[in-house]
Amino acid sequence: MADKPSRGLIVYGYGLADSVKPFHYHIHDLASIGCCGFLAPKDLAPSDNEDKGMVRELAQLLDADEASQGGVGEHHETVPTISERFIGMKAALVTNNLDVKLFGQGLGLFGIELNNLGHTGAPMNSLAFELLKLLGFEDGKTSDASQFDLVFVHLGSNGKTADQEVSAAKDTEFMNNLVGEILQTSSQYSAIRSRLHLSLVMSYGAVAEEDRGLLLSSLHDERNSNLSVLFPRQSYVIGGKFRSNVRKHCPMFVVQWQEAVTRKDNTEMLTFDDFRKNSGSLVIPADRFLYEIAFKLWKAPKYGA
């Protein structure tokens, strides 16, 4: 645990997990130094269209799934704002998707259009600079106060058409370069890397097929020793069975990194098999993710995942 509250940057790629290739070196570099695992999202309703599915998945990461059932951009009285739930936490949502932006604003996140952060056509290091500046990191120093405690960057889309696959490839390359610039900047300044809690989340989007070998049940297949009964159950398993509303395939990847705070696993690449064999976190429900981050920011008490 750090001696000061961290400031969180989450880079989230909706539907981009399939687009990660071996040449996306910066994404794999982060996986090789971070604490890795999976998030288990809920099954999306069959009627959810692409944009609705995107909002629903974000809602799960924010533990506000019930809010996604209402109108986009509405303030949801049954769901407290982020600030109300997490000890006054100031959070921003950076995205180019209008529905995502409006939904986040309804939960009390400050919406920022990604295209307006910095200037059009600005190099990637300029964008990384602007994101870190929102968290109070500037000129290699950490300010006592910051505009936000948490910045959530949203990228990606879901779909299998040729145009959508090209768009996903571009978004993944964008994310890879962004992660690279953030890691490079952090490596240069100890004041930043000691306080920045960086998370990467990659999902498969609203997938329906279960025959891809990406099954939650496979995470326990190799635990056949006499000591297997001693492995703890996680919160996506209740009474020895999966939570009824948890998708049993295609989990989301999650990597967390902060110098001298997060554990380093034995993973080398962001792939299902590498995470399955070498990550230490295995699986937690997607709606528990934000509580993990808020704890690192001193905005939530510790809880059992």
Image (spheres, grey):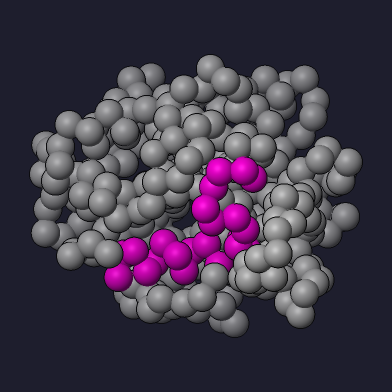
Q: In the drawing, does residue 51 fall left or right of residue 85?
A: right
Residue at image coords 76%, 43%: 214
Q: Position of residue 97 (x, y in %)?
A: 57, 42
| Nearer to the camera, 284 or 273 | 273
Q: Is residue 291 above or below residue 49?
A: below
Q: Position of residue 156 (x, y in %)?
A: 60, 36
Residue span colored magenta:
276-298
Residue at image coords 11%, 59%: 144
Residue at image coords 67%, 20%: 166
Q: Position of residue 301 (x, y in %)?
A: 38, 78
Q: In the drawing, does residue 245 fall left or right of residue 303?
A: right
Q: Is residue 47 magenta?
A: no
| Nearer to the camera, 15 or 186 | 186
Please say whether residue 108 is visible from this viewpoint: no
Residue 116 lies in quadrant:
top left
Q: Is residue 223 above or below residue 272?
A: below
Residue at image coords 76%, 52%: 221
| Nearer to the camera, 226 or 27 | 226
Count the marks.
0
Q: Is residue 278 magenta?
A: yes
Q: Position of residue 164 (x, y in %)?
A: 72, 27
Residue 169 lies in quadrant:
top right
Residue farthest to the front, as pictured:
226
Image quadrant where one finds the C terminus = bottom right
Secondary structure mostly seen in the magenta stretch: helix
